[in-house]
Image (cartoon, grey):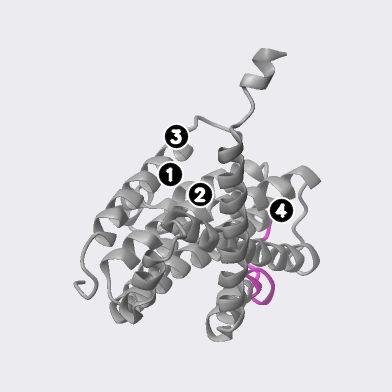
C-alpha cells in the first residue's frame, strides 16, 4: 500500500496538470474560433482536395480497377490532410510574428508548447473533416470498397499525418514573413504532392522525379496509407522512422527561427 501511495502524483503536480489541461482546452477553443472566422482559409482547404478527388475519380475516372480506385483515394487523402497542418503553422505562425501576436502570446503565462499543441489539435480535427468528406465521396460516387478496419486505419494515418505537416509548417512560419510564407507554403504543398506521385503515377514521371520522391513526406505517408487500406502488405517501419526524423529536424529548425528577433525573416 505504501508503495502504491508513493507512486501517486504530488498534489502540486496534479494541480499543475489540471491548469495545463484547462489552458490547452481554452487555447484549442480559441484556435477553433479563429479558424471559423476565416472561411477564406477553411472552406478552400476543405473543398480543394474533395473537388480534385471528385474530378479524377468521378468526372474523369482514371481508376478502372478496385485497387486503382483505392489508391486514388489514399493519394488524395494524404494530399487533403497535409494542407491543414502545413498552412496552420506555415502561414498562421508567420502572420502571428508579423502582427505581433506571437510576442504577446510569449509574454503570457501560457507555455508556448501548449499554444502549438492546441493549433495542431485543431488542424487534426480539420484533417478529420477532410477525411470524412473524401470517404463519403469515395464510397458513394468513387465506388471504393474497403473493409471497415481499413477505412478506420486510413483515417488514422490521415489524422496523424498532420504531425509532420505541422512540424514542416512550423519551420516555414518561424523563418518566413507572412507574404513569403503564403507563396512558399503553397509551392511546397502542391509541389510535394505532384513530386510524390499523389496526382500522377510516379512510373510515368521522369527518372529525376522518381529519385526525388522518397525524400518527400507525402511519398512515405501515401505508402503508409496504402498499407492501412490493404493495398500493400505492411513492410519495414522505414516510412515511420523517416517521418519521425523529418519531424524532429523540422522542429529543431523552427526553434532556431523562433529565437530570432521578430521582423527578421
Q: 102 or 240: nearer the eye?
A: 102
Q: Secondary structure at mark 4?
A: helix
Q: Depth-wise, is mark 2 or mark 1 nearer the camera? A: 1
Q: Is residue 109 above or below residue 150?
A: below
> Distance from label 1 to label 4 (Cα)?
28 Å
Where is mark 1, residue-wise? 243
Taking the spot 37% from the left edge, 41% from the top edge, the residue there is: 245
Rendered image: mark on residue 66: 4
Q: Quadrant of the N terminus?
A: top right
Q: 48 or 247: nearer the eye?
A: 247
Q: Indicate left or right for 258 with 78 as reference.
A: left
Return the disc, 1 or 4, that comes first in the chain's sequence. Answer: 4
**C-beta proximity under 8 Å, tags 2 and 1:** yes
In magenta segment, residue 154:
no
Give the class, few, some or many, for how many residues have Cα within 10 Å of label 4's Cα (few <14, many ≥20).
some
Q: Indicate left or right for 254 with 44 as reference.
A: left
Taking the spot 53% from the left edge, 80% from the top edge, the residue there is: 41
Where is mark 2, residue-wise? 221
Q: Secondary structure at mark 1?
A: helix
Q: Which residues are magenta?
A: 53-66
> Distance from label 4 to label 2 (Cα)?
21 Å
Residue 186 seen in render = no
Q: 79 or 118: nearer the eye?
A: 118
Where is mark 3, residue-wise? 238
> Distance from label 2 to label 3 (Cα)?
11 Å
Q: 157 or 73: nearer the eye?
A: 157
Q: Indicate left or right for 170 with 221 as reference.
A: left
Q: Quadrant of the C terminus?
A: bottom left
Q: Depth-wise, is mark 3 or mark 4 nearer the camera? A: 3
Return the disc, 1 or 3, that comes first in the chain's sequence. Answer: 3
Amino acid at each position: 500500500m505504501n508503495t502504491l501511495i508513493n507512486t501517486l502524483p504530488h498534489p502540486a503536480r496534479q494541480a499543475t496538470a489540471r491548469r495545463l489541461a484547462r489552458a490547452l482546452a481554452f487555447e484549442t477553443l480559441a484556435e477553433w474560433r479563429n479558424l471559423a472566422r476565416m472561411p477564406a482559409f477553411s472552406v478552400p482547404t476543405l473543398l480543394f482536395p474533395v473537388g480534385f478527388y471528385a474530378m479524377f475519380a468521378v468526372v474523369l475516372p482514371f481508376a478502372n480497377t478496385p485497387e486503382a480506385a483505392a489508391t486514388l483515394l489514399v493519394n488524395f487523402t494524404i494530399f487533403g490532410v497535409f494542407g491543414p497542418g502545413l498552412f496552420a503553422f506555415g502561414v498562421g505562425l508567420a502572420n502571428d510574428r508579423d502582427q505581433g501576436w506571437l510576442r504577446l502570446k510569449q509574454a503570457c503565462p501560457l507555455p508556448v508548447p501548449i499554444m502549438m499543441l492546441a493549433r495542431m489539435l485543431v488542424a487534426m480535427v480539420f484533417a478529420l473533416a477532410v477525411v470524412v468528406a473524401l470517404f463519403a465521396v469515395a464510397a458513394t460516387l468513387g465506388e471504393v470498397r474497403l473493409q471497415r478496419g481499413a477505412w478506420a486505419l486510413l483515417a488514422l494515418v490521415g489524422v496523424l499525418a498532420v504531425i509532420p505537416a505541422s512540424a514542416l509548417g512550423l519551420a516555414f512560419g518561424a523563418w518566413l514573413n507572412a507574404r513569403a510564407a503564403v507563396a512558399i507554403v503553397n509551392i511546397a504543398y502542391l509541389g510535394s504532392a505532384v513530386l510524390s506521385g499523389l496526382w500522377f503515377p510516379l512510373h510515368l514521371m521522369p527518372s529525376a522525379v522518381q529519385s526525388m520522391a522518397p525524400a518527400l513526406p507525402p511519398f512515405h505517408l501515401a505508402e503508409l496509407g496504402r498499407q492501412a487500406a490493404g493495398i500493400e502488405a505492411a513492410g519495414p517501419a522505414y516510412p515511420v522512422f523517416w517521418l519521425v526524423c523529418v519531424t524532429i529536424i523540422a522542429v529543431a529548425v523552427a526553434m532556431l527561427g523562433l529565437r530570432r528577433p521578430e521582423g527578421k525573416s
